[in-house]
Amino acid sequence: SKVSLQNLTSYLMFGGQDRGNINIATDKPNDEHNDHYSKVSLQNPASSERERLKTLESEFGAAIKQKIKVVSCRKEFIAAYEISNNRTTTTDRRCDAYLYNNVTNNDMHNLAFYNPLQRDQFLCGGKVILGPKKWINLNDHDIRKCGHNLESSLHAHSFPYSPTFENRDDFPGIIVQNLRASKTQDDTFSSGAAYATASKGETQNSCDVKCKFEDGGGSPSTKRIYGTDWTVTRSMEGEQYYPQLKIDKSAWKKNKFYATTSFQSEVMFTYFSYDSNFRTLQGARPVPYSEGIKGAVFLARNCASKNGRENLVKKLIASSFRVDSLSSCLKNAEAPQGVANLKNKTRIMEKYMFLLAFENQNTDDYITEKLWGPLRAGTIPVYFGAPNIREHVPFHGVIFVDDFNTTQELSEHLIKVSNDEDLYNSYHAWRNQPLPAQFFEQYNRTQTTAKCRMCRWAHARKYGLGWNHSKQAIEPVQLSRETCVDGLLRSPAVESWWSSANDHKTLQSMEVTPLSGNSRDSACPLSNQTVAKVGSDLIRKVWSNDGATDFYIKGKTSESSVLRLDFPMKDHSPLNAFDSRTVWIQDEISRISLVVDRSDDSPIISITAVSGRIEIEIEPDSLPIRLRIVVENLDLFHEGALSLPTYYGKNMAENVWNHPEVFALA
């Protein structure tokens, strides 16, 4: 597959949603090993860098009015702009040489930092936090915290350090709050107190991420994940009474999520809990055949159910089978002897052979204490409710109403069971046998609390880790995204450089000479920036940032070159272009994205991919250029997610082309 990227200017840089005009053409394969050949051409929308500079003039209006010169480093030292006296001019002075030498040599210490993003950015190893759409002057105290290497320290990060599966408990905690009509506090870690709270967190029953959870908010409640625009609708009620609980499979695209009894929720909020239910489930003493009342008890106050359970109870009461309704709905009997408190439902159920476990609605996965209560009490549940109930209790311990064509057939079966000791005991035999593997697969996830599971999910989504929806657990990223070098990059891809001959068909290997950083010594993971000379004219820098790998390539050359990156992904989809800066390949589990940013007047950049090999054709007039490699797991849960960027992937891309800027106020 082959993709050509045309540069998109400030419209995308400043939050525009236009991805450009995308034209896809499928041609006859040029390579006999290719199953597909695709070419994507992205047209620039009508916008220019002048719009970005206009925004800067607005942000720094006060400085401009005072005739203070504002020098901005743009795109990792690609260009600089001086804004003074309401004029914008371009300077050819390198930002790294001018800006930082200006500060350190002249002892001006008059640096400003602007964050154009909608989320916090971390500077100086997390010691300085800058909130969204804000700019601050870095005073002497801040600069001392940053150390002597300002160029490196003032490189912005989305996280305090690179997120991994192993360090998940070291990260700031997830804060889950109730959504309020008005937001009264700064929704960022930059407030200081919030970051301290999140860093401390609260461990929820051995939760493997820090988690602080605000209770209350009613039911259903709407929770918000602090520091994001995500909302989570949370409740153990049923969707037929509360329509807002019905899963909208496209809601995730609007950052709206669910924590309900439905197993289609991002976070499953079940009535059954491994810790509180499992140990008593099999260990419960069955109601002895010789002692149990040969009938069923019905306990319910709601006589206006959505599934008409009252009609079914009335028919059973009218049959020859005994049914005692003890609560306010259809009450026809008093509590049996020895039961003084009707609130003690377990004590009541222990008196009867059966409980009419009738839910108030028939909704998949909506399985309440109506089922789990009698199983723990040693009573046989007669179940009416969730249509997929057999997926949840795959053992012979429940009588299902829908197994019978009529109420009369059900009544006759209950009478038969109550009069046959062997048949009665067969419904309790599962208590002395290993539970089916299917049951463990369904409910092992409840070994952690629902609160912890929500924090786990939010942590995985926010920091780009794997999320196993079935297990409700964080998993490592399938492919390594550690940045490792041995002279050249060795992980997450193997780097090599090639020059293009005059015919543009033959590639010749280019010599790469380490200049600084790790030289030819191995470094895994890479902790510092490493610099190398490619051929005779190109300079290539590589560093690790927020779990991604960044390249910066500059130089003056008259020859075309090719950066080849070999990834451990041989069978993958054709190269896909999401916008004019981001392309990716993916297999059944993983996605490898390449984010490209270059000078505003650079030409089309062509990228090809086949069998895990991505080649970027670098023309002389496309320099300087920045590339970012993002490795992550696919979102296999949400419908349509395979063709859209993830939250983490989108942030990693935006940090390349709309990253925070350092300014010198001269």
Image (tube, rainbow, N blue to C red):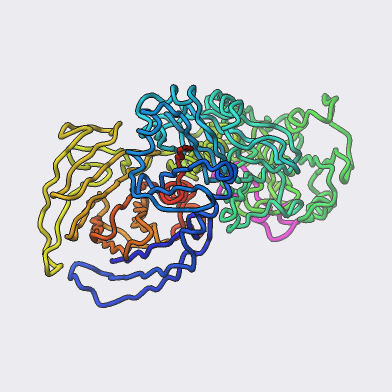
In the depicted view, which residue is nearer to us: 292 or 661? 661
Percent across and percent down for residue 154 are 41, 34
Q: Specify whether 282 is left or right of 564.
A: right
- Residue visible at 60% across and 45% down? 230
Pick out the residue farthest to the bottom: 28
Q: Is residue 238 above or below residue 123?
A: below
**122 or 575, which lies in front?**
122
Instruction: From the top left corner, tell me how far across and down residue 618 is, in percent.
Output: 24, 58
Residue closest to the eye, 659 or 282: 659
Q: Is residue 430 visible?
A: no
Relative height, residue 53 to residue 428 (above, below): below
Q: Does residue 559 show up magenta in the picture? A: no
Q: Indicate left or right for 354 with 189 as reference.
A: right
Magenta-tinted stretch: 389-410
Nearer-the-camera pick, 87 or 543: 87
Q: Position of residue 460 (x, y in %)?
A: 48, 40
Asked if residue 528 is positioned above or below residue 536 in the image, the reply reads: above
Looking at the rendered structure, the number of numbered marks drawn on it comes to 0
Residue at the spot x=56%, y=28% of the render?
A: 195
State the residue at coordinates (63%, 45%).
231
Q: Is residue 394 magenta?
A: yes
Res. 604 in view: yes
* Placement of the N terminus among the 4 image quadrants: bottom left
Residue at image position (53%, 49%) is 85
